[in-house]
Image (cartoon, rainbow, N blue to C red):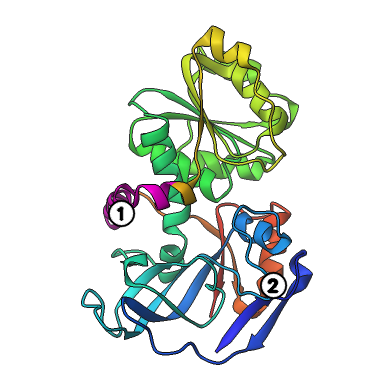
Amino acid sequence: MKAIVCQAFGGPEVLAIEDRPDPPPPGPGEVQIRLAARGVQYVDALQMAGTYQVRPEPPFVPGSEAAGEVVAVGPGVDRWKADDRVMSRHRTGAWATLANVKAEGCDPIPAGLSVEEAAVLRSGHGTAYHALLQRGRLRAGEWVLVHGAAGGIGIAAIQIARQFGGRVIATASTAAKCAACLEEGAAHALDYRGGFVDEVKRLTGGRGVDIVYDPIGAAVTDESLRCLAYGGRLLILGFLGGPASIRSNYLLIKGIEAVGVYMGGFQANQPEVFAANTSVLLGLAAAGKIRPRISHRFPLERAAEAVRAVVDRAVIGKAVLVG
């Protein structure tokens, strides 16, 4: 099989395509998938650099989300059979042409979704659904400020918030990204680089927003606290701009909740809720109510270019490796 291998910790330059032996026949509870599409996430870049919470040692095959066709099933697997089209979850190893995964890590590709869209559905939309509906307790009519809104989890957050009655103010860094956010259903889109507090207050009639969806951190988090209404919820999804120092006086005076959202911990500690969430997302996708936005497609052998596009923030929505 072909595989993209991270040969040492570093940037995109550490990736190489290799011919590797095919995986062995799937073991008990496993399926083997011929992968046709794979997502490229910022998390992959962090793993390659050795700076993510989950830290595989090189050499390893990156990639945690993919889709393709089942080619073999192991003992005890009766849900899947050869030629079934599935989306799959991987700890690592998705950037290859074949992979063995646990049967419960697969779900059917919803009708109407391409294999490329299916490959990247669960990570972004799963994060947004859990963050907004469960950690943020979103209610219809509430205002949601989405940072990094043109990224993979940002576009998903716009779609999920709108689906459940939220009114979205999106922030992004370019006119093209703001336009994409409006196309996806944001009520307003702001270039955050010149500051956003005053405009958010104006748009909400001086009240502020109910939820901030924040994968950025750093100074963005501090400004976001000033945007929250009384009883608001700050959802902390990551630190693309660096960790933030949260001012506890804002939390106290305005009754604000600062809530962490870590999908790895959620999946490990509440697998039954994670599975139920996935079922909801599959239904929404099959009904045409949510759909990943893919701006960049690369053949598998150009994985380094895909990672560079993600790191350089050239991607709107998702980047996919195909072939």
Q: Which is more toward the observer, 25 or 219?
A: 25
Q: Position of residue 233 (x, y in %)?
A: 48, 24
Please state, as top left, top right, bottom left or bottom right, where the N terminus lies in the image. Answer: bottom right
Res 137 seen here = yes
- Specify the label residue 58 is tagged with: 2
Badge 2 element: loop
- Quarter of the view holding residue 70: bottom left
Q: Is residue 275 left or right of residue 48?
A: left
> In the image, which residues are magenta?
266-289
Residue 235, relative to residue 1: is it above or below?
Answer: above
Residues at marks 2 and 1, CA–CA distance in whole angstroms: 31 Å
Residue at 69% from the left image edge and 51% from the top image edge: 313
- Quarter of the view holding residue 114: bottom left
Q: Position of residue 79 (x, y in %)?
A: 22, 74
Q: Position of residue 78 (x, y in %)?
A: 21, 77
Q: Residue 279 colored magenta? A: yes
Residue 283, relative to residue 97: is it above or below?
Answer: above
Q: Position of residue 245 (x, y in %)?
A: 69, 26
First in sequence: mark 2 vs mark 1 = 2
Q: What amino acid type is highlighted by mark number 2?
A: Pro
Q: Is residue 239 left or right of residue 254?
A: right
- Specify the label residue 275 is tagged with: 1
Q: Is residue 312 left or right of residue 43?
A: right
